[in-house]
Amino acid sequence: LAQLYGPLNMLGTIYRSINQTLVDTEKLLKLLSEPTDVNDKPNAPDLIVTNGEIEFENVSFSYDGRSALSNISFKVPKNSSVALVGESGGGKSTVLRLLYRFYDLKAGDGRILIDGQDIRDVTQLSLRKAIGVVPQDSVLFNSSIAYNIGYGKFGATPEEIEAAAKAAQMHDRITSFPDGYDTRVGERGVRLSGGEKQRVAIARTLLKNPPILLLDEATSALDTATEKDIQKALQHLAEGRSSLAIAHRLSTIATADLILVLKDGQIVEQGNHSELLALNGVFAKMWSAQVQGAEDVPQNGSHQKEAV
Ligand code: ATP
């Protein structure tokens, strides 16, 4: 996902100057030459989201002949949160990319359904309208902070923008700038930290109000206060939606309804946090390694690591 947002950032700046009415990041996809192999079927209908239930049914996927996912099945029921964990290269990002339809599954390689509709059969635009993405590295346009948040909803009022910033735990930080919501951010303005940028993305997604959420947790360690703010913001965002999140810090998914442990493209364990600890397998090992790692970090720095 991060690979996509780099070019999107640049295109965003260019495109905005051409068309000020642009409201959806996803529309920018039309300007990108990739993905090349995803096309809407003739007369494809729009996705109709009723509950926001996601289902991966016997999904397999390869990049250039190299298997990345083999025969995985799981469900994200209405309003529930599913977290993906596992070592690097296990297939976590591929799951999100497939749901966002960067690639289509080949015939015989399973199905991905949203409320019973195969995502290959509906328009890409309607699919992407239904999905909000909070990536690791959020894109900021070289514009005001209000613009950056309001981008989530065409015609968002200043009151709506402020309410979203408050829910995303970003309002106090914004009002600490001399120009408040008019402060210019991005490369040619105030540089926001990774955690602040992520909260702007959360506020933007709150305004977009999609029934389905894809979250890619930042890998870098955040200080305790920032971590707490982001968790609170994400809780607001996830309320009443179905979410699929890549988690690197296992402490952040203690309350997930279901955790899937991916290894070499397969789900090797699944359950909630305490069920997985009780299994005493791959997840329990990852957990104790993170707890151990956190204990090794000196706790007197300004950038101290969270417990895990
Ligand atoms: P990480 O935690 O490092 O982001 P991940 O669990 O998200 O890893 P994926 O990015 O889904 O794993 O990768 C799964 C497998 O597919 C890996 O073997 C990876 O090398 C391969 N892969 C991922 N993206 C591509 C790509 N664009 N082209 C070719 N192979 C890829």
Image (spheres, rainbow, N blue to C red):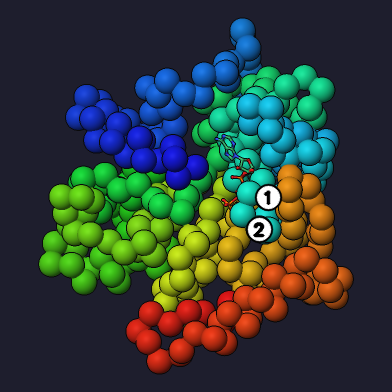
Which residue corresponds to the image point at 24% horizontal and 35% vertical from the top-left?
13
For the residue marked with disc 1, what is the amino acid?
Gly
Which residue corresponds to the image point at 68% horizontal and 33% vertical from the top-left?
66
Q: Nearer the viewer, residue 233 or 197?
A: 197
Residue 263 placement (x, y as % from top left): 74, 53
| Image region (quadrant) for ligand 1 | top right
299 horizontally vs 158: left or right = right
Residue 108 placement (x, y as % from top left): 82, 22
For the residue marked with disc 2, what is the amino acid?
Glu
Which residue corresponds to the image point at 50% horizontal and 62% vertical from the top-left?
219
Residue 252 placement (x, y as % from top left): 60, 69
Badge count: 2
Report the residue marked by disc 1.
90
Q: Nearer the viewer, residue 170 or 102?
A: 102
265 horizontally vs 172: left or right = right
- Give the quadrant of residue 152: top left
Report the residue marked by disc 2.
87
Instruction: Decide: few, some or many residues near mark 1? Use Cα within 10 Å; few <14, some 14-19, many ≥20.
Output: some
Does residue 74 show up? yes
Q: Nearer the viewer, residue 291 or 47?
A: 291
- Give the quadrant of residue 307: bottom right
Check whether the beta carbons of the residues at disc 2 and disc 1 lie within 8 A of each other: yes
Which residue corresponds to the image point at 13% horizontal and 67% vertical from the top-left?
178
Real-space CA distance between mark 2 and mark 1, rounded to the nearest whole angstrom: 6 Å
Dot 1 lies on which element? Answer: loop
Q: Is mark 1 within 8 Å of ligand 1?
A: yes
Q: Is mark 2 within 8 Å of ligand 1?
A: yes
